[in-house]
Image (cartoon, coloured by chain):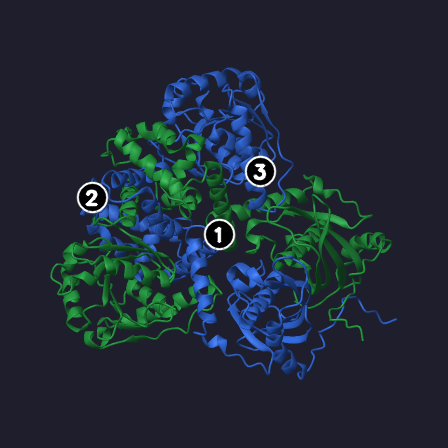
Chain colours: A blue, B green
Amino acid sequence: MSEIQRAACIGAGVIGAGWAARLAWNGIDVKMYDPHPEAPRRLSEVMANADRAMSKLTIAPFPPKGSVTFCDTMEETVSDAEFIQESAPEREDVKIKILAEIEQYAPTDTLIGSSTSGLLPTKLQAEMAHPGRFMVVHPFQPVYLLPLVELVGGEQTDPAFIEKAKALFTSIGMKPLHVRKEIDAFLADRLMEAMWRESLWLVNDDVATAQELDDAVIYGCGLRWASMGSFMTFRIAGGELGMRHFMSQFGPALKWPWTKLMDTPELDDELLDKIVGQSDDQAGGVDVRELERIRDDCLIAVQQALKAQNYAAGKVLAEHEERLYKNVHAGNNEQADVDISQPLKLFNTVVQPQWVDYNGHMTESRYLQVFGDSSDALYRHLGIDRAYLDDVGSYYTVETHIMHIKEVAGLEPIHSTTQVLDQDEKRLHLLHSIYHSGTNELLATGEQMMLHVDAKSGKAAAAPDWMLAKIKPITDAHAGLEKPDVAGRSIGIKRNV
Amino acid sequence: MSEIQRAACIGAGVIGAGWAARLAWNGIDVKMYDPHPEAPRRLSEVMANADRAMSKLTIAPFPPKGSVTFCDTMEETVSDAEFIQESAPEREDVKIKILAEIEQYAPTDTLIGSSTSGLLPTKLQAEMAHPGRFMVVHPFQPVYLLPLVELVGGEQTDPAFIEKAKALFTSIGMKPLHVRKEIDAFLADRLMEAMWRESLWLVNDDVATAQELDDAVIYGCGLRWASMGSFMTFRIAGGELGMRHFMSQFGPALKWPWTKLMDTPELDDELLDKIVGQSDDQAGGVDVRELERIRDDCLIAVQQALKAQNYAAGKVLAEHEERLYKNVHAGNNEQADVDISQPLKLFNTVVQPQWVDYNGHMTESRYLQVFGDSSDALYRHLGIDRAYLDDVGSYYTVETHIMHIKEVAGLEPIHSTTQVLDQDEKRLHLLHSIYHSGTNELLATGEQMMLHVDAKSGKAAAAPDWMLAKIKPITDAHAGLEKPDVAGRSIGIKRNV
């Protein structure tokens, strides 16, 4: 359960509405205050996006959703709130006025946060009656999906409230980052703003367009930034010799016109020692080879995830895969040679890290995925390509029988063989077997019935004669092989009666 | 197939070796030249990482791997190369000398690239005999995994070679970005460098540590940057009113001390129009609601991908899921009430976008995943928790029989029911059925045999009496239900003889 039951959100713009969505999804009832006539419509739009996103983000059971209610007065909104978040326009005078109004009606010990992107908490809290419970609580768009929230106390903020806020935001799935020293724009926005100002210069000077500058991020450093920041990235770039080596190599570049920001700190021994020390702390004793593997695994996972969206770097990967498959088709690859006297060896891979369950073993559903990939490899071998799928039809799996025989751990090499047990004009009866490619042990079998479906009608239909003729020699060759006793099996507890 | 068969890499540091790995994996034979005694060892380390990464990145069939060979002389290295990449230390004089040596032996029309991070191609090519075929070809670490490569021509570069380079790098899975105007550090490194210099100030001034600054990226903006750069992000932040609205809101902040980079371009009407026009071009007519959905889907996919790595934002998500499951356990959720007189309704979800195949339907292996999730829901219902798994044991799936009945599209709501068909002390015989939650149509059935395995011995063992007693009333209640005819079925083509 989250730490609280009732929250108040002042301001229902995209940030305030995003807060309401995150709070409600985590079971907290939210009262909202925003006199703007469009506020309810805006809220419902953000909420629709949030509902869509949250139901996809995880299948873990959220608590019953909290209510979100617009109130007519500030009093009604905040008087019983256990947490109040102000998300008004980015003007110091406006925010100070709203905070005064909140304090008029809120319990004196209720945590109050401001969503400001850069105003200083000391200034915002200066006129408050109970400033100890106030801090900047700076989220990132979309608030319902991004975990980061910066907590910035002012001179009068009570450290106990910082701790209270950390617990609260953790309980609603966020990652609180306590910004220990008060500074304009805090941390994340300073980094973003530096990059943004540099970008504006490049557009201003006609060096690059908006699209080109975004491309420079999303196909390169942006993929790394999803899991590692600059310090960790550069530590790894320093290789075995670490951060000190990296800084000695690239330190001189700080004096070069590599950005418009030419006012750089003096990289003296004191600063260098500080950076190296903090980088060592961050790495926590994990060596660079292991950090490289973590970096690579995250980069792989992120690109695979984006591939499923067919977007950004994922689109580049998808297009390259298509190129690689076409290449096999064109006969430019050894895989084209297949011995049909034995079960066909068409598919091999390693157990990918994201296929592994908490015990370190390949998870159940990935066996079926490997059987599916093996069927796809057979289809490609038979000459079923994009044109066939579009114009003729495809084989659909209608039934599958899996036997799990032995477990296999992540990164182990595996391959499958495919025996054609039977065919008729519409059906194809297959037995896939997955083996460990090192020990050759049998790990699992997957017996499947495939049905040929017409591309136009979407109904079961005979495969064309040329396709049947292509399958026939394999079926005939495999008819002479022993029929494994897993084939034709049914499930049940057999009792000795 | 890639555009070429033979490449040469001059310099075998982490960048040169990364190039060799990417080229070889795409079927190109690589000759390397690096007189440093440690070069072969370094190469083999990078190559080992690359082999590990590439075999995980995709199961698409790479062509037979190209060879990577160290040569003793520059002549041997480059004389028959179709592409030559220089990755020497970042010193203009060193690079100019190497380029001269390359030209002494290379065919005059061979594309030559330099991996420099920021030196100007016009200067590097100034003394070349055939400068038209030279350009900066700037990759990002790790070269084998990141798609971005910046192509920067100098004054003497022949535009035809830029086109040739685009085709070559696309053919090896990269995303070439032509930097049209020559500038120090090109595009990506200018953006990174601006952020990096800002970071160094924050460390220098004791505002934040390396770890805190990296956290400010990886839990927030870094997740966005994996799929959208600043311009697209800010366009979306502008909402329905678009980029002009965003700029009018945040334009004034350019004068505020939100970074050390206080020298900003004048945001006059001309620059504003340019930014808005380029942003419109980039969006290509896609409206902001759709852009929001793309953003959210990418953020979800990236966080789910990182969850499988249990790293960065993925770790935050995993911890929140654990919290949510604990909450259900503690009985704080309606799901705790289950009617055992009917097949148990324990699991519901929506068909997640990454579960969908190219036809828009839920892909085969995800059915088994839903059956697995349904079994997990049953286990949680029976009280199997982390302590049980650690100390007592768990049920393993040994056999599964799936019937595919009807297809279902992405984002459709589905649920499962679970009928306990039989039990003995070691075994549990289940029938899961997946239904569309809107129409209540049956989509698939999954009959499964589960075997109880002891946590210590890893062998089949009776479940404890209290667990058997917990299952018994369900088995008894379900014994009275009709046994669906899919149960006990075996696969085969039945012919009318």
Q: Position of residue A12 (x, y in %)?
A: 50, 26
Q: Amino acid at mark 2?
A: Glu
Foreground mark, 2 or 1? 1
Q: Find the distance from the CA under tag 2 to the CA under tag 3.
A: 49 Å
Q: Amino acid at mark 1?
A: Leu
Q: Which mark is residue A116?
A: none
Foreground mark, 2 or 3? 3
Q: Find the distance from the CA under tag 2 to the CA under tag 1.
A: 37 Å
Q: Image quadrant for the N terminus of chain A?
A: top right
Q: Find the distance from the CA under tag 3 to the CA under tag 1.
A: 22 Å
In the figure, A6 relative to A386: above or below?
Answer: above
* Residue wearing tag 2: A266
- Of labels 2 and 3, earlier in sequence is 3
> Pointer 1 indicates a residue of which chain?
B
Query: Dot 2 surroundings within 10 Å: few (below 14), some, or many (20 or more)?
Result: some
Q: Position of residue A440 (x, y in %)?
A: 57, 78
* Residue wearing tag 1: B306
Which residue extends farthest left? Answer: B127
**Res A175 visible:** no
Would residue B314 appear left or right of B326 to someone viewing this image?
left
* Residue wearing tag 3: A51
